[in-house]
Image: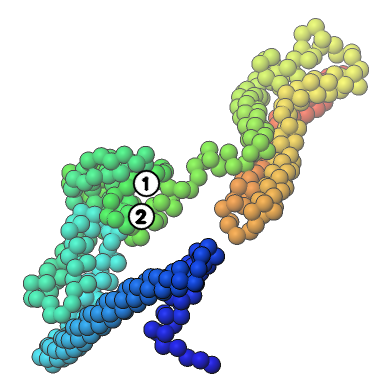
Amino acid sequence: MISLSLRERAGVRGVVAAFMLLAAPLAHASGLDDLLKQVRESAQAAARQNAEREQRFLDDRNQQAELQKQAEGEAAAAQKRADAAKAKFEANQKALADIKAKINAKTGEDAQVYAAARQTAADFRAATINSFVTAQLPDRIKFLDGLQHSEGVLGTDQLQQLWVVLQEDMTETAHSVHFPAEIINADGAKEKAEVTRVGAFAAFSKGRYLSVQADGAMVALPRQPKGKFTSEAKDFEDAKEGAEPILIDPTHGTLLAQEAERPTLMERIEQGGVVGYVIIVVGIAGALAAAFQLFYLIAVGRRVYQQLDQLEQPSADNPLGRVLGTFSGALAKVEEDAEVVELRLSEAVLREVPKLERFQSYLRLAVAAGPLLGLVGTVTGMILTFQSITESGAGDPKLMAAGISQAMVTTVLGLGIAIPLLFVNALLSARSRIIVQILDEQSTGMLARRLEAQRA
């Protein structure tokens, strides 16, 4: 293989280019002299072009070498600065470690005290973030946050302030105070109101129980506890002296919220659905019928006992009087057959029995139908429960609560109307039997007296 230098390669390229440029003019040369002249001129032109190209190449190479040298110099300077910065950083780290070691050596057991103080601040903050005392004194949370995230030596003022915060919480837990605060209502609106705080266990305003959020804001419970609890809170707020009962919650609102979420009586009834309403209608109808019949039997029984004292003067305002009056006046015929008299007396007694035993058949029906209707509600409630499980799975018990509630509520309603009506029906049956027995006794006695009169 032939190796050519840079200059030789450039010359070869120039000759080739010259022949290419002269290819067309050579075809028109008229003689050898002209041809030689043209060849020389073309060679000179090619030599000039090659020289220019070579010079430009050399200039470019020198410029690139200069730039490379400059870049290498800058890189070396940057590396030198980096090495110096690294050395300084390592020196500072070592100095810092020495300083910390000296501080630890000087503080000794104090470091454990500082660690205990920071841990106490963290634990106390977690325990009182939802406290009503914290809602009244929110600035102590900032202090506790700063203390638990501090580093190094703690000052005596910080330790004393921690002691004051702890003592203040113990003291305020035993106090009931009024203080102004901003309250978030159930609809999200904010209002300024006076809050009554009972230690760290309860707080209320205008009879509304409050809870504390994670950010320290006090919120009125969306659903307030039912019954006497709200009135007790109002009375406690208005009390000027003495002692008043009040509901407290050591969980800072959790138990109160659960108490408020318990359904009311009407909500329980609504959970029973259509079957529950049917049971209630049956029970109300039975109760009205039983009450009406009970008062009727009491009034009739009183008049019957009054009639027993006046058998010779029958009155038409009571069953006994009407039975006794069957053979008084024109109907009292001594010569009438005893069997006819007995039949007439039986007829008179039977005429009074339907009124005395009125509604008892319906009450027996209600007693039997109540549990059956409750069973119907139980079955429909379980169907709803299984439908919820099929649609959403059994992961969330709240999805099954509606069906289970209907099943249980209807069962309770069915038994709730059956058991009282059972006792009431027994009472009505007993009272009606007593009156019917009196009518039978008196009618039999009347028949006996009539037979004695016939034989005399």
* Nearest the eye: 339 or 199: 199
- Vertical position of residue 129 compared to residue 158: above or below: above
At label 2, counting other C-alpha atoms closer than 10 Å, the crowd grade (few under 14, some 14-19, many 20 or more) is many
**Residue lying at 34% horizontally and 41% vertically, measured from the top left:** 188
Q: Residue drawn at (13%, 80%), measured in percent from left and top?
A: 153
Identify the residue at the far top of this view: 330
Q: Residue at x 70, y 18 (%)?
A: 321
Which quadrant of the view contains residue 162? bottom left
Distance in Å between CA atoms under marks 1 and 2: 9 Å
Q: Secondary structure at mark 1?
A: loop
Find residue 306 and report its horizontal and vertical position in percent.
Answer: 62, 23
The answer to which quarter of the image holds residue 148 is bottom left
| Three-letter amino acid code at the position of disc 2 | Gly
Residue 221 - label = 1
Residue 124 shows up from this direction: yes
In the picture, which quadrant includes the C terminus?
A: top right
Residue 97 is situated, as x and y percent measured from the top left of the image, at 17, 89
Question: Which residue is the site of mark 2?
Answer: 253
For the question of whether residue 426 can be seen, the reply is no
**Tag 1–tag 2 contact (CB < 8 Å):** yes
358 on left or right of 303: right
